[in-house]
Image (tube, coloured by chain):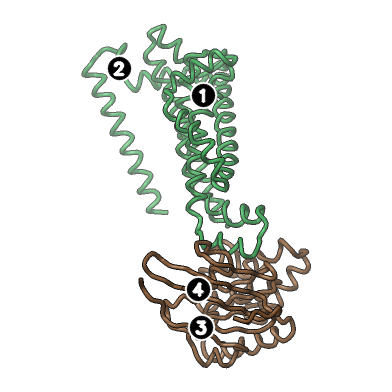
Amino acid sequence: MKISIIKKSRKITILIFWVFIWELCSLFINQPLFLPSPFEVIKVLMNLIGDYYFWKSVFNSIIRVILGLFLSIVIGIIVGISAGLNKFIEELFNPLIVCIRAIPVMSIIILALVWFKSYYVSVFTTILACFPIIYTNVLQGIKSVDIKLIQMVNIYKVKKKYIIKDIYLPSIKHYIVSGILMCLGLGFKVSVSSEVLSTPKYSIGLNLLNSKSMLETSELFAWTIVVILWSFIFEMVFKNYIKRMDKET
Amino acid sequence: MEVKNDYEVLIKNLYKDYGAHVVFNNLNINFIKNKITVLLGPSGCGKTTLLNIISGIERKYSGEVILKDSSISYIFQEDRLVPNLTVFENVAFVLKSTMSKEETKKTTNKYLSLVKLMEYKDMFPHELSGGMKRRVAIARAFAYKSRLLLMDEPFKGLDYKLKNEIIQEFLKIHNEDKRTIILVTHDIKEAEALGDEIYTMESSRSL
């Protein structure tokens, strides 16, 4: 309990330190258009929070992030397990994964703008950004399974569904968790970037674009803080869920 | 070599090497059905390699390996237990593909009792001693319905009293279900106590 309080107060002190640095820089530059003070940004953020439009934008953006993440996790796990168990599937998907990884996110967003309605552009972009990470992690997890256990199950002719459930899934669990953790932050970044270009009606991205167009730098900072906070909340919720799961097992 | 029809495993002209190290050069051997054949020899003479070839784990060799039946149980030199499954689940894991839920439970309990692990059945491999893990591997191999049982130093790591008890139970089971057993050991006493046939293997040579 005592250690936990010390840890928390240390984190808060570090946070205060960086806010202080931000304030110093803002005072030094003395041009709110380039770098507004943290107090000004918090004031704007407080005004935004009281607005129904703010919550509607945040809600819609989060739904798109969740949808994109969910689909990339499901597709990544299914394709990753299939590729891990079948060399041909791995070879088949390899060029696709290499291409997706190499394509700049901006190219994906622009292509998606041509192909989809603005609402789905960020979902599609999130899938393309996160799916290769989940896929690669799952594949790595499958390959790390002890070959001696696989020899054993082959001799005892254990059915594939039991091998996947009792050997592969427990082995790739940690790889999936680390993949999802990587994707949580990336998902928010990519999704909001897509929204800036695709401008769906209610979205954080559209608000970022509007703030930039109106030269409302404080608002731009406030919306950015919103993205950081939600990304952080998602990560915390997920980490706590994993901790609870580990305790239960 | 005279080949009778009562074989379970027939090996013809087997050649196996690891680079310059020749393990088998034109090996011919037949393992007789329902008998316990013991392979006796020093470490590195190819006993485990032969079991791996018979079981299909080792595929890089020339010659012929003919099995009358493809159902095999294998007690490996290492225990090869699934780390996230309990003692009970480890044994049941190899049975549930071919048995009903009820039969799996009954068979698992029977063989766990045989190796005296019933009171540890809910424990995970990392909570067991080396000897206990060995007994789980033995129970798993005995419980699996196979015609051929490959045993690679199965009683290694067991204390003398327990080893004798399990050997007695093992012989009792063998008299009931009459499987073909190929047992690898370098313990002459064990070989004499268990083997219907004993083959002595010598250390292999390098080219």
Q: Are marks 2 and 4 on the same chain?
A: no
A44 lies left or right of A243: left
Chain B rendered in what hue? Answer: brown
Dot 2 alpha-carbon crowd within 10 angstroms: few under 14, some 14 to 19, many 20 or more: some
Give the CA distance from mark 2 to mark 4.
83 Å
Label 1, on which residue?
A125
* Position of residue A212 measured from the top left corner of the image (x, y, whole percent): 40, 11
The amino acid pointed to by label 3 is: Thr
Q: Disc 2 is attached to a residue of which chain?
A: A
User: Which amino acid lies under the numbered mark 1 shown in the image of this protein?
Assistant: Thr
Q: CA distance from mark 4 to mark 1?
A: 61 Å
| Viewport quadrant of the N terminus of chain B | bottom right
Q: Indicate the position of residue A119 as horizontal and vertical percent values.
A: 59, 17
The residue under label 2 is which amino acid type?
Leu
Farthest residue to the top: give it.
A214
Q: Which residue is mark 4?
A: B26
State the residue position of label 3.
B185
Counting other residues with Cα less than 10 Å from the Cα at mark 3, is it few (<14), some (14-19), or many (20 or more)? many
Q: Mark 2 vs mark 3: same chain?
A: no
